[in-house]
Structures are given as C-alpha cells and as structure tokens.
Amino acid sequence: MNILQALFFPPEQPGGVSSMVPYIQERFNQMDYEMELFSLPKRIRNKGNEPVSFKTFDHTPYLGNTLVDKYIQTYRDYLWWTQMRIKKKYDLIHAHHPIAAMVMKRVFPDTKLILTLHSSYERELILNKKIEAGGPEHQFLTSIYRELEVTADRILTVSHAFQTYLHHYVEDAGRIKVIHNGFDEKRFRPIAHENEVTQLISVCRLVPAKGLDVLLKACARIKEKGHPFVLHLIGDGPIRKELEAMAQSLGLYDDIIFYGYMLHPEEFMPFFDVFVLPSRAEAFGSVFAEAALCQLALVGTNVGGISEQIEHGVNGLLVPVEDDEALAEALETVIIDPDYRYQLARAASDKAKKDYSLERVIAQLKKVYREEKSK
C-alpha cells in the first residue's frame, strides 16, 4: 500500500506530530508499505494565488482580518507547493493538519483521506491572547471543523478530551475516533542518578498557554519554604524576556536556567527528577509521555490530554489550572519525598510504555488504513 503522510511543519520540528510521524514512516516502510512524508517548507510564502472556497461556509466576510488572510494565503501556498511537487498518486493520504487535509482532497479528490487533528489552534490563540473568544478569527477557525468533516473520509484525534471539544463544531461526532500519540521507546534512555538538589524540568514553547507564569509563582512559594531546587526551562517563544524578568522579580534568578530551543530534549531529560508543566489547555501533551518514558515524576494540570495521561497520586500529580498554591504543594511533595517521587516516576514509565508505545499506534493505524483502502 502506498501512503502519503501530509504534515504541515517539516519533520524534526519540536512537537508530537513532527517528531512522531518519521518513526511511523520508518516502521511502515519495514513492512509491506510504501510511506512518504510531505510538508510545506518555511521558505514557501506568498507563492500561491488560486481562489479558495469552502463547501460548508462562506469565508469572504472574514477577509481583511490579518489572521484569516494569512490562513487563506497559507492554504494557497500549500496548494501551490503540492501541485508543483507531487506527480504521483497514492492509495491513501493521511493528513496531520487542516490545511494539508483540505489541499490534498482538492488535488486528489478520488484518494481516500484520513485526517488526524492534533490540537486546537483557536484555543491556543485565545489563551495566548492573540484573538478573542467569539470574535471573527475564532468563528472562522471553528468553522473549519465542519469543512473538515465533509472533506475527510475518516477523522482521528489524539485524546478523548479533544474529541469532546470537537463535538461542538461537527454534525456527526461519532465519526471521530481516538488514537493517542505513540513514541519509539528507543529514543528514551532513563539514567540512574542521584541529584542532591531536586531538578525540575519543563519543555514547551514559551507562550501564555503553557502557564509558566503560574509555575514561577509556585517556585517562589517553594523557595520561601526553604526547599532547594533548580528549574530547567527548555524552549523559546515570545514571552521569554517577560518570564526572565518575572523570575528576577520573584528572587528566582539563581534557581532557574533558561536554555532556549533544543531539538532533542529527550536526550537531556533523563538526568532530571520531575517534569512539570501547568498548561492552561492541551489536546494531548506529548511531552508528558516523553518525560514518563525518561522515568521522570510528572506534575501537570487537570486539563485535556494531560488528565488522560496522569492518574492523580498513582503515576503523577494533577493540580487545578491557574492555581500556583496547589502547584507549589504538589512540587513540594515530590521534592521532599524522593521515594514517592521515584514511585510516581516508575508508574508513569510503565503506563507510557503500555499505552503510548509506537507499536500500539502502528497496529491501530494499520487497521484504519486497511479499512479505508477496502471501502
């Protein structure tokens, strides 16, 4: 079977989908499949000029809005690149981004199209204070979900929480099935170590949606109680300077290290003790599974896919969103009790190996591909 994996970002970008699909490709190519990857290079901008229309709604009232205009132009660019670069046909196309899905169906209308929705762009924009809930950008972006419903032959998503979220925007929510992200265990090598001072680590884009301001406030509370720690922040983003200034104002300058962007943080994580990320929303939260496979204790917020990965008190700790006091208490618990921390880390690793293995994803996708091919 000949399958095209249509990404938006090129492989080797940070994030669950771009870091996962190349490993899926490798495994399928070892079997009786031919699988290729396709994505839009960053250099391709403002190349496309073909008209864009949608079957389920009229987007023209939203034109003139900067975000909408950029989205439409990106659609045109992806279309231009696809038409120029792809000269063969495939048995199936598996898209991992709304624009990739819509373009592929337009170029290959007779080819079965599977779409995996990995995250909610509009929720991230709202949490990052780029758009307003209920505003024109929000209306436009949520209208895309209905368009995708009539475009794709099958829709998948990465968590039951995100599946529930999508119910508000589609007509037949029963069509949407869940396949959690999967990870190649060979990438993760837990290392036995003894850190005299508890080492906390967080890996994410430095944007408001990740709740790092809440994390810094929680760390200030921990320091006030006299518990030593070091927080390692891996990632970059638009609020880095704001977070650095906040760390200084809270007296945390000597307790936090800002590393910036790192391509393969999983090579770094096994040397630390606790992974913490108080996100305000997560469709899945791949980095929690990656941290679990590195055998770190997990502390996260009770939202979205995080709460599906963590059973509170069993394989990690969950806290309410925006609650720096509860987050400080959770972190204090794992800082002062290394045995409990190790117990949580072992349980997290066992669950991740069982539920988020790449073998499980391969088996589930193989079943989906065969079903769609046989229709």
Image (cartoon, rainbow, N blue to C red):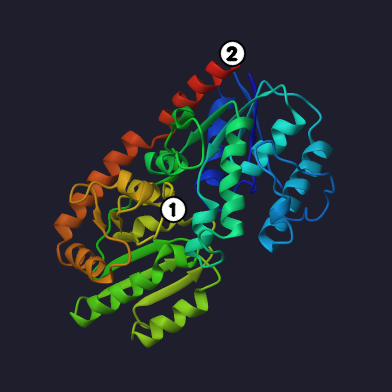
* Quadrant in the picture for the N terminus: top right
Q: Secondary structure at mark 2?
A: loop
Q: Residue at x 67, y 20 (%)?
A: 91
Could you tell me residue 179's position as x and y percent?
Answer: 44, 33
Residue 189 visible? no
**Residue in front for this viewpoint, 245 or 78:** 78
Label whose residue precedes the other's in the sequence (1 or 2): 1
The amino acid type found where label 2 is placed reads: Lys
Residue 359 visible? yes
Could you tell me residue 267's position as x and y percent?
Answer: 44, 54
**Residue in front for this viewpoint, 13 or 237:** 237
Disc sitting over residue 375 in the figure: 2
Name the residue that disc number 1 marks.
266
Q: Is residue 56 left or right of residue 168?
A: right
**Residue in front for this viewpoint, 54 or 19:** 54
The span from disc 1 to disc 2 (Cα, nearest Å) is 40 Å
Q: Secondary structure at mark 1?
A: helix
Q: Residue at x 45, y 24 (%)?
A: 363
Could you tell me residue 122's position as x and y percent?
Answer: 54, 54
**Residue sitting farthest toward the top:** 374
* Quadrant in the picture for the C terminus: top right
Q: Residue at x 51, y 50 (%)?
A: 120
**Residue in front for this viewpoint, 49 or 244:** 49
Write down the quadrant of residue 261 in the picture: bottom right
The amino acid type found where label 1 is placed reads: Glu
Dot 1 crowding, Cα within 10 Å, few <14, some 14–19, many 20+: some
Where 305 sits versus 129, above or below?
above
Label pair 1/2, CB-CB below 8 angstroms: no
Where 130 sits versus 339, above or below?
below
Q: Residue at x 54, y 68 (%)?
A: 237
